[in-house]
Amino acid sequence: MNSSDSSKKKFSEHSIDRRNFLWQSGGGLGGIALSGMLGRDGLLAETNQARQPIGLHHAPKAKRVIQLFMGGAASHVDLFDYKPELIKRHGEKWDPGETIELFQSSPGNTFKSPWNWSKYGQCDKPLTSIVSELGECVDDMAFVHNVVGKTGVHSQATYLQATGFQRPGFPGMGAWVSYGLGSLNDNLPTFIVLPDHRGYASNGPKNWSSAFLPASHQGTTLFPGRTNPIADLYPPKESFINNKSEIATQELLSKFNREHAASRVADSRLDARIKSYELAARMQLSAPEALDISREPAHVKRLYGLDHNVQNWPKEINEIEEIDYFSRKCLVARRLLERGVRFIQIWSGNDNGFPRRNWDSHEDIKRDHGPLARGMARGSAALILDLKQRGMLEDTLILWTTEFGRMPCAQGSKGRDHNPFVFTNWMAGGGIKGGTTHGESDEWGFRPADRNNPTTCHDIHATIMHQLGINHEQLTVRHDGIDRRLTDVHGSVIQPILA
């Protein structure tokens, strides 16, 4: 027997022994729950061996992350990146001095933002009026204005920002964090996704899949505000299912699962499925309370803009509706963080459609970006202020991103085409130095001012991992003969924005 066969046998025998111990100790689904808790606490020998290379590299500044993702590509030059040259040259032929290839149009005239700019905070950060609510928070925020992408295609660019790769088959950042750090609670998922209420953005659930990581690390999708916010958590009304039949079903499933698992010790999918059912049982008790914002005090609802009395929304995209839905997700996110969820992804904007209900404002930037930005800014500002007053901002890292930016010239007369050449991200909390700006775009907001030293999504991801206490180069998993990681073979921590 060679050494490889010997190690495989040792691994197999060890897994069976551990599994039998769990079945005998806790029995069925309870045993799997016990396994998850022991693994999270590092009390299983096999788990320790697996976790050793990807444990904390240094003392973390953050324990949890919220990623705010603007699906469709939000315009940096209409929100955060002030460019006086666009105001000065508005309506003139746009000529950056080089050949320009746009996604679906030819370059139009120079196009200033339809909204006025004002400075906010002690750092004098310029913002447009549609994100003015964030003015109260800019001294807690770090803006990165020289982020570059690799493609102007929505699906690929979204993958890149969400997973570090511009093609499917790679874990989302939340899955990596879940895999590397484990859970902070026993009753809710480690990684939760709150999509746009109208549907998924480009790629849908593939943005938060676990891919080649164990399936238990994928994002769990919740839709706050819906009658049934968690799909399949409860049986349908007037169902034949009752408490007695549920117990009998679980006992029968437990028997089948034990038999199936004993012959497939190296396959993580059944374990993940069992864990998901066990977690669902606990979520039936804890999730409804976490999602219920009705008992939040009036001043908190007012902070998030949820004190309106509007019951029916108009057909057109509108400010109050966008504030309601985005702020509702932000408030639910805060409640989930309080209950031990480690990574939350909040989406604004669904996939392509018309009329626009995302940030892909080819036709009319003012019509689309206005309501979306007001909703995003109100919810984001309230979230920052709420976390800060509860003492949670210092160890909660917030990342705002989008798949790419938009061009400084007009598409038609009122829209903007895709700009993957430069755009903006911002971060707050979790050891980030507030009131700072890192990197600049050029005078147009077309490309980085320093084209030799842009910021990439890998740098953003490396910085997030660093703040969580992880060396991004060491959090790797062998897959198809390659040591894969969130940052591929790139990424440097953005030191100037760290407190």
Image (spheres, rainbow, N blue to C red):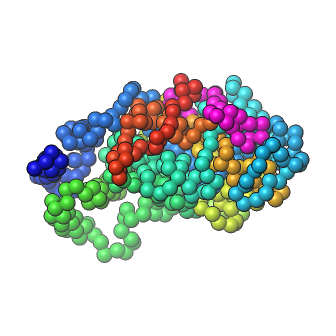
Q: Residue at x 50, y 56 (%)?
A: 167
Q: Nearer the viewer, residue 231 or 314?
A: 231
Q: Residue at x 51, y 31 (%)?
A: 493
Q: Nearer the viewer, residue 450 or 163?
A: 450
Quadrant of the image occupied by residue 417: bottom right
Q: Is residue 15 found left or right of 472 in the rendered image?
A: left
Q: Residue at x 19, y 56 (%)?
A: 265
Quadrant of the image occupied by residue 102: bottom right
Magenta residues?
428-453
Q: Is residue 412 magenta?
A: no
Would you say residue 139 is visible in this rendering? no
Vertical comparison of 140 with 68: above or below: above
Q: Residue at x 55, y 62 (%)?
A: 199
Pick out the residue farthest to the right. 92
Main SS category, magenta section:
loop
Q: Nearer the viewer, residue 200 or 385?
A: 200
Q: Position of residue 10 (x, y in %)?
A: 13, 47
Q: Position of residue 357 (x, y in %)?
A: 65, 60
Vertical comparison of 28 with 248: above or below: above
Vertical comparison of 435 with 299: above or below: above
Would you say residue 35 is visible in this rendering? yes
Q: Position of residue 458 (x, y in %)?
A: 52, 40
Q: Is residue 231 found left or right of 256 in the rendered image?
A: right
Q: Is residue 435 magenta?
A: yes
Q: Is residue 90 found left or right of 118 in the rendered image?
A: right
Pick out the residue farthest to the front. 2
